[in-house]
């Protein structure tokens, strides 16, 4: 057998071997699993304005709708990170709650506090079926995935840590979102998922499922409009201390699945100091974030006490503040110079058992 003949047989053998390998590589065993990518999108734009409550010198107020423009923005402290939590559940139908489903996976990651959406994309391998993804975003100490202001053992029972004292009330901010989708091979050989809503089914592109998160809270700000009169009387803004008492029941927990508050405390108190003087004769006395429903107006009932050093300067009782998710309500009036005892001012003698949450300077 000459060398040319041997070389020809060797080449033929290699070709047969490569052809056989290629056939083995591309003929995978039959499977009902698909790779999906959850794209996490936490909205970082400021809340839109909602309503304005304006108090007069007699303690009476008027309520007005505000134009839905964006309110003031803020920058989270550099010692913080954005934390993103994802829970993936298999359910029987999109009408089912997750407590009837099965938790498939839970992921907790951190990202830079200033990162815009999408903050990350997570990969999962899932079998044929219907799924709901729940997502939550908040702030934690830098690169730390443990709970900070919110307790997040499960996303249908997120709770506020009412003993936590953030240096900046803005760090109570949070966002939540959910998405339903199905995985099957009837219409796609690769098992590309389909996003499901109550009325539509939308095929995905490249197996990517965007999940959008918006604030789970409404924000209010309390402005005093009589700063100059207060200063002209020889007072100093640095000596002021503000106490806000939440009365009746105030939300302290949230269900991402139903998009509603689901835990309440009888009352709690927040203490803070003025933070912003915009130069228009007003001063921001206090502000806060309150967990709210996704589709309706909620309310909080508060008493507001203003102290000049240790002496009570003024207080307003039984102020009802309307709140809408991802919106800001403005409360303003001559709170610094209004005479104690006039209008709707007075001590609530029935108030007790308060839980104090102090916000340091």
Image (cartoon, grey):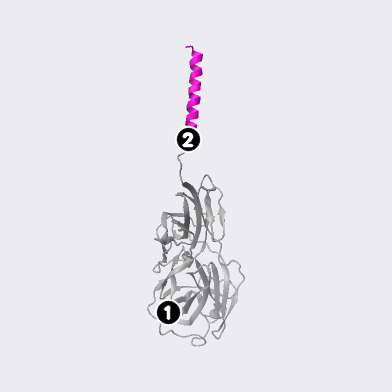
Residue 207 x, y percent position in the rendering: 53, 49
Judge the density around disc 2: few (<14), some (14-19), many (≥20) Cα neighbours within 10 Å.
few
* In front: label 2 or label 1: 2
Main SS of residues in magenta? helix
Q: Mark 1 points at which residue?
A: 310
What SS does tag 1 mark? loop
Image quarter hosting the C terminus: bottom left
Q: Do the residues labelled 2 and 1 touch (CB within 8 Å)?
A: no
Asked whether residue 8 is drawn in magenta, I would say yes
- The residues colored magenta run 1-26
Q: Which residue is drawn at 41% across and 56% down?
A: 103
Asked whether residue 253 is drawn in magenta, I would say no
Q: Which residue is drawn at 48% across and 47% down?
A: 34
Q: Of 287 and 41, which appears nearest the observer?
A: 41
Q: Distance between the residues labelled 2 and 1?
A: 78 Å
Q: Name the residue under label 2.
A: 25
């Amino acid at each position: 057998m000459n060398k040319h003949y041997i070389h020809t047989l060797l080449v033929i053998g290699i070709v047969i071997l490569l052809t056989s390998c290629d056939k083995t590589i591309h003929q995978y065993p039959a499977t009902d699993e698909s790779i999906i990518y959850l794209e996490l999108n936490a909205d970082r734009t400021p809340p839109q304005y909602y309503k304005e409550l304006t108090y007069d010198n007699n303690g009476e107020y008027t309520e007005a709708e505000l134009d839905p423009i964006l309110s003031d923005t803020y920058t989270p402290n550099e010692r913080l990170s954005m934390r993103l939590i994802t829970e993936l559940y298999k359910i029987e139908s999109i009408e089912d709650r997750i407590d009837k489903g099965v938790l498939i996976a839970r992921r907790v990651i951190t990202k830079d506090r200033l990162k815009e959406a999408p903050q990350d994309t997570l990969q999962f391998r899932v079998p044929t079926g219907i799924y709901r993804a729940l997502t939550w975003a908040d702030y934690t100490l830098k690169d730390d995935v443990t709970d900070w202001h919110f307790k997040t053992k499960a996303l249908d029972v997120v709770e506020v840590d009412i003993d936590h004292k953030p240096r900046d009330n803005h760090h109570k901010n949070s966002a939540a979102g959910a998405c339903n989708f199905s995985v099957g091979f009837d219409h796609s050989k690769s098992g590309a998922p389909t996003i499901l809503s109550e009325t539509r089914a939308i095929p995905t592109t490249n197996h990517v499922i965007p999940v959008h998160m918006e604030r789970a809270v409404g924000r209010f700000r309390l402005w005093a409009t009589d700063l100059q009169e207060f200063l002209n009387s020889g007072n100093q803004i640095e000596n002021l201390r503000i106490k806000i008492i939440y009365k009746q029941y105030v939300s302290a927990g949230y269900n991402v699945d139903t998009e509603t508050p689901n835990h309440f405390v009888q009352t709690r108190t927040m203490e803070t100091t003025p933070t912003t003087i915009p130069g228009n004769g007003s001063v921001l006395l206090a502000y806060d974030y309150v967990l709210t429903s996704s589709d309706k107006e909620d309310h909080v009932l508060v008493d507001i006490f203003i102290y000049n050093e240790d002496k009570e300067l003024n207080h307003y009782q039984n102020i009802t503040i309307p709140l809408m998710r991802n919106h800001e309500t403005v409360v303003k009036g001559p709170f610094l110079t209004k005479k104690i005892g006039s209008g709707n001012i007075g001590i609530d003698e029935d108030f007790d058992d308060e839980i104090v949450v102090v916000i340091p300077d």
